[in-house]
Image (tube, rainbow, N blue to C red):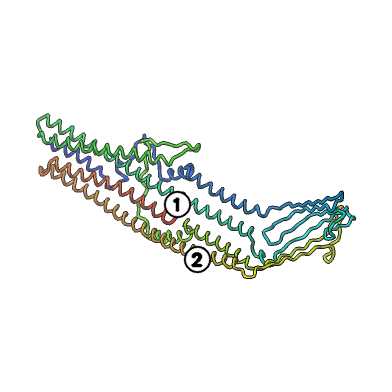
Amino acid sequence: MKKVWLIMLLGICGNSALAQQGNDSIFVLPDTAKPVTLENFYQLVIRYHPVVKQTNLLSDVAKQEIRLARGNFDPKIESEFLLKHYNNTEYYRLFNGGIKFPTASPVTPVIGVERNTGDRLNPEHYISGEYNYQQLYAGISLPLGQGLLTDERRTALKQAELFRDMMEAEQVKLINKLLLEAAKDYWQWYYSYYNYRLATRTTAVAEEIFRRVRMNFEGGELATMDTVQANITLLERQVNMQEALLALKNSTIKISTYLWDSTMNPVDLSLQHAPVVPSSSMLLSKNILEELISEAKLNHPELRKLNLKIQQLELDKRLASEYMKPRLNVSYYMLNQPFTPEGTSNSFVLDDNYKLGIDFSIPIFLRKERAKVAQTRLKISNTTYDRDITRRQIINDIQAAYNQLLNNGTILQQQRAMVDNYNRLMSAELLNLENGESDLFKINVQQEKLFNAQSKLIKTIAEYEKQKSVLYWSAGVRPLAF
């Protein structure tokens, strides 16, 4: 009778092993559990986490930089009034007001009006009294040398647009880092949760064995040492279960730090919430390595930022080269045409009623300008070296992460095979017990090895999934297309 109930009890325990984890009772969540899939977890992090909301501010900062740069193209109202009155004589009263319209091209249109009076008026400022000493003018100013191809305001706008792209790359970088840490903690929670379920089941088995052994001891069928042995096993399992419970509580607290609601209040998970077993722990194909390397070369946030920085420096070099040209500005203004100050229309006359101006200057040695160009070239070379080093480091990190993932995958397969083999050993030991060639001590040893292998399998699955997240992060790619 002693052998019969022991064989039945341990046979049930052995058949519930982790050979096929999808069919194992440990991974079948109870109805009271609240499953949290990795996909749902990522969605909550992306939607409500404060770090994500902080990264959204980077886009707003970039928008304001562009707005600031576009402010250089705002129309500008300019006016000047000069009055001199001396010894009861008004020498002059000069007024000049107009609007400039800076554009994305080198041409700057200007519209304005002058009104000049006075007894000692400079002939240069004389305006006839035909239109009450007023004169309308409209024209353009055009740089033919320095400032023709680019200038500070056009360069500032282009750099602000590149800065927006840099902020987008920085946003991707920060979110990817957050998702990596969240994934690591999720899979640690996964291990803690299912390891605790395993520890609970092994403790229940030990309690049942101890109860049966004590009952048979009291009936005189077993020796005292059998009861002591069963009690030691039970205490060991209870200690393991208590440690597993503590790990589960701490990992649940840690995973809760990533969860917030729509009103920015933190969300706390309870022990009823449960991570979900991955639908597939299949190894990634070898083609994924080349795909990730190609994707990283094009879109890795660090490389994007360095490429954009080089583009900004190229704009600086182009602007610095522009300053090496002579300054040659030409302006042409039509006077009292096509409208008079009274509002009547006139025909266009290009060879009369106009003002023409030419402004020319150039430094003799251009030392300041040449130094600025040389400095920018050095910065471009330095940043290019940084980009090449970073690209090589990223590719190496991807390859190293992939190699580690392959190794973890191999270990995962071996661990699954190890659990299968421990199941076979357990079955063989039960057969020996039935034939009178084993005892409770040997059964406990084999069972302990089986449970340890099951626990290690759960941990190996978690480590494999963690490394998968590291691989995608190394390539600058968000997991699960988030």
Q: Residue at x 70, y 57 (%)?
A: 102
Q: Is residue 85 left or right of residue 72?
A: right
Can residue 102 be seen here? The reply is yes
**Type of amino acid at the residue the image marks with label 1:** Arg
Q: Position of residue 151 (x, y in %)?
A: 64, 61
Q: Which residue is mark 1?
A: 478
Q: Quadrant of residue 240?
A: top left
**Residue 381: mark in rendering:** 2
Check disc 2 and report its element: helix, strand or loop: helix
Around disc 1, counting alpha carbons within 10 Å, would you say few (fewer than 14), some (14 to 19), or many (20 or more)?
A: some
**466 or 58: which is nearer to us?**
58
Q: Position of residue 20 (x, y in %)?
A: 29, 47
**268 or 350: which is nearer to us?**
350
**Residue 196: mark in rendering:** none
Check disc 1 and report its element: helix, strand or loop: loop
When the figure is inspected, residue 7 is found, relative to residue 374, above or below; the finding is above
**Type of amino acid at the residue the image marks with label 2:** Ser
Q: Residue at x 87, y 52 (%)?
A: 342
Q: Is residue 255 left or right of residue 11?
A: right
Q: Quadrant of residue 2?
A: top left
Q: Is residue 363 left or right of residue 117?
A: left
The mark closer to the camera, 2 or 1, is 2
Q: Position of residue 400 (x, y in %)?
A: 36, 59
**211 or 331: which is nearer to us?**
331
Around disc 2, counting alpha carbons within 10 Å, would you say few (fewer than 14), some (14 to 19), or many (20 or more)?
A: some
Q: Quadrant of the N terminus?
A: top left
When the figure is inspected, residue 18 is found, relative to residue 1, above or below; the finding is below
